[in-house]
Amino acid sequence: MSNRTKLRSGPPGSTPAVSTFAGRRLAMLALAFALGALLAGPIGAVTAGGDDAPMADEVAQLRAEEARRDAAQIVDLTAQARNVQQNLVPVLDGLAAAVPVAGAAPGPLATRTAVVDWQRATGAAVEGFADPPSAGTGVNIARSGLAAAVRALDLAVDTYAAALAAPDVGRPPLLELAGRQRDVAVATWSTAATQLDVLNIDAGHGHAHVFLPAVPGQGALTADGAPEGK
């Protein structure tokens, strides 16, 4: 919808009547306008000048509040990422044995009990990122990347479960798909973990390396050689 305001005029061809009354009214309006301008000038100047400082203080206060909020959320998100990382490592280890990376031949099939445990772990991780709090752009990028990664891994586990239930002839394509989805999850997590590492450094906490296990061929970023917390 346009924000422009249309100016309305009188009916086409209309001509206002000129009278003594109209002339007097115009003169009174002109005088009122002149007096208003004289009074508004100094008052407006005082008002405008007085508003600058409170506005600047309010902006500074909002920025300080956002900085404090993000600082606290960096700590919370890092703790959450470490917890999720620990819970997902067994899932990735199991998938690595059942669906090796880089097109290697599938290993022995995982048991249904193991796959149910994988689904429980990935489902909990997805749920943990389901209701994110408001934060600044940097924190939002890291959290969104981690959330996308766990959703991809959850999908990979579901695909693997479908492969177990499929006939032998239809199983290989599903296993291959589960492997690709797992690789996407690991690569996505690595990008988000790198962003989280940068956030911790900028916040003065030092390096925070919260990466999932990755192998060549997954396209994942890995932790640098800097000591943790340094």
Image (cartoon, grey):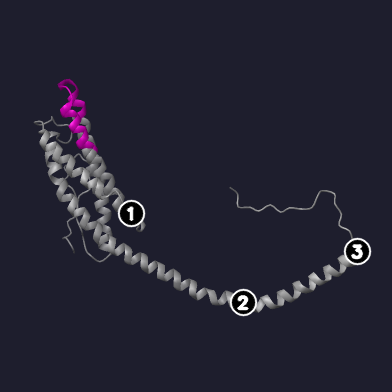
Magenta stretch prevailing secondary structure: helix
- The reply to whether dot 1 and dot 3 touch (C-beta < 8 Å) is no
Disc with the residue nearer the chain's start (2 vs 3): 3
In this orientation, which residue lies closer to the viewer: 226 or 125?
Answer: 125
Q: Amino acid at mark 3?
A: Ser
Magenta stretch: residue 170 in it? yes
Find numbered disc 1 in the image and state the secondary structure of the residue it sits on: helix
Find numbered disc 2 in the image and state the secondary structure of the residue it sits on: helix
Residue 161 in view here: yes
Circle 2 is placed at which residue position? Answer: 45
Judged by depth in the image, the label closer to the viewer, 2 or 3, is: 3
Q: Amino acid at mark 2?
A: Ala
Mark seen at residue 19: 3
Find numbered disc 3 in the image and state the secondary structure of the residue it sits on: loop
In this orientation, which residue lies closer to the viewer: 2 or 23?
Answer: 23
Please rate how many residues cluster around mark 1, counting C-alpha atoms within 10 Å: few if below 14, some from 14 to 19, many from 20: some
Q: Amino acid at mark 1?
A: Asn
In this orientation, which residue lies closer to the viewer: 201 or 90?
Answer: 90
* Magenta residue span: 155-174
Q: Where in the figure is residue 203, as x and y percent of width and height?
A: 27, 65
Q: Where in the figure is residue 9, as x and y percent of width and height?
A: 77, 53
Q: Quadrant of residue 25?
A: bottom right
Circle 1 is placed at which residue position? Answer: 140
- The reply to whether dot 1 and dot 2 touch (C-beta < 8 Å) is no
Residue 96 in view here: no
**181 versus 138 height, above or below:** above
For the residues labelled 1 and 2, the Cα–Cα distance comes to 42 Å
Q: Where in the figure is residue 227, as x and y percent of width and height?
A: 16, 60
Magenta stretch: residue 154 in it? no
